[in-house]
Amino acid sequence: MSPAMALKPETKEEDDTVQLESQYQKGVKHLCDSGINQVPNKYIWPVSDRPNVNDGEQKEFKKNLKLPIIDFSELQGSNRPQVLESLANACEQYGFFQLINHGIPSDVISSMIDVGTRFFELPMEEREKYMSSDMRSPVRYGTSFNQNKDSVFCWRDFLKLMCHPMSDVLLHWPSSPVDFRKSAVTYAKETKHLFLMLIEAILESLGLVGTTEEKKTEEEDDILKEFQDGSQLMVVNCYPACPEPNLTLGMPPHSDYGCLTLLLQDEVEGLQIQFQDKWVTVEPIANSFVVNVGDHLEIFSNGKYKSVLHRVSVNSMKSRLSVASLHALPLDSVVKPSPKLINEANPRRYMDTDFYSFLDYISSCEPKRKNFLDSRKMG
Ligand SMILES: O=C(O)CCC(=O)C(=O)O
């Protein structure tokens, strides 16, 4: 018997299952466009993982929590030392903050949201040109978290764009909508520039580079140069409105692999972060970024700054779009705790790692919480 014949479904039930599975692989937008009023079993999460468990308590808590707000314009002025302190506090206590007055023009932001939205409205035949299971592909359209491994699917479709080096990757980016590349390149360059200024401030807050007025040492210049040459991955996430949002998740609890993520979300809420063992919702602030510490920064800071679990809930009323810009060191750089942050009182807490080991790790297992970071912990 040929392998193709061996795989052929034998009963009508098996045939239906195969057909459904291939539908699910095309994504949630496609599923919703085909008209559904119930969440298929494939997307139903175990009760303990669903959003809104302990509903009453959660709502009470949500009202009281505010993410720290960092005013980027203040960071450039005479208040820099105080803002650096707030920044350090946010990275230690929350792993997250909202960044306002960041200087990226609002039309750059609205154009990115606009082309991202129109990309997901393209016919399936156009979107599926970019489907790939190769984690290293410069462009990747897909669904769920890791659609080749997930047993339960997430209510999310995504477009992942590698941004570095731009001259090599740009030709692979979607050519439709016609203005996609122009808006996405401008947005990628602006966020990279903002990231570089933020990471310099973060290194300063850790005592690893001197103040902006001081001349940088060769060693400090080298760290900053490594970040300039670092990797950038942009993920455009689309979470269609869901008929039964309490049964599923847009994204499961995870932490981000890189150094810092700059997240742009539209006006629809959905991002939840873990704070003091509870899930709290981040309320979108127009024209701001939600910034979070990634695994590499937790390792680099030897555990001082926290890479915190976050997840996404969906809702029945509105589709939601977010654009995450993940910044890291160059793909082949070894990430390890900064020797300056290791001493007798604070011994080394993490093993060396690099981006390729992360990719191998996530393509070989179903991502469960923050396993990758845990796998790097010593002792
Ligand atoms: O859509 C969001 O709010 C979060 C997205 C996210 O966590 C990610 O892309 O890693």
Image (cartoon, helix red, strand yellow):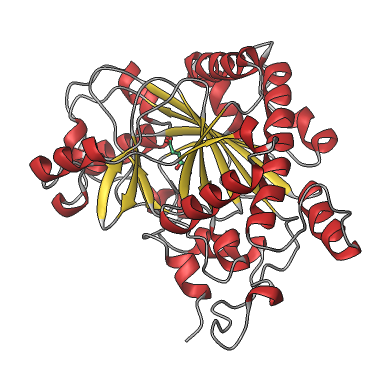
Task: Report the front residue among 70 and 11.
Answer: 70
Q: Is residue 323 toward the left or the right of residue 229 in the image?
A: left
Task: Report the front residue among 206 and 182.
Answer: 206
Residue at 26% over, 16% down: 35
Residue 94: give x, y in percent of width and height.
41, 52
Q: Residue furthest front?
A: 78
Residue at 49% over, 67% down: 373
Q: Is residue 13 toward the left or the right of residue 224 in the image?
A: left
Task: Report the front residue among 106 and 31.
Answer: 106
Which quarter holds ligand 1? top left
Instruction: Reply above or below: 346 against 170.
Output: below
Residue at 66% over, 66% down: 354
Instruction: Reply above or below: 178 against 132.
Output: above
Counting labels gives: 0
Instruction: Reply above or below: 335 against 274.
Output: below
Q: Quadrant of the N terminus?
A: bottom left
Residue 316: give x, y in percent of width and height.
22, 22
Instruction: Reply above or below: 114 against 276.
Output: above
Residue at 28% over, 57% down: 276
Q: Is residue 187 toward the left or the right of residue 165 in the image?
A: left
Residue 265: give x, y in percent of width and height.
46, 27
Residue 225: give x, y in percent of width and height.
84, 52
Q: Is residue 317 toward the left or the right of residue 103 in the image?
A: left
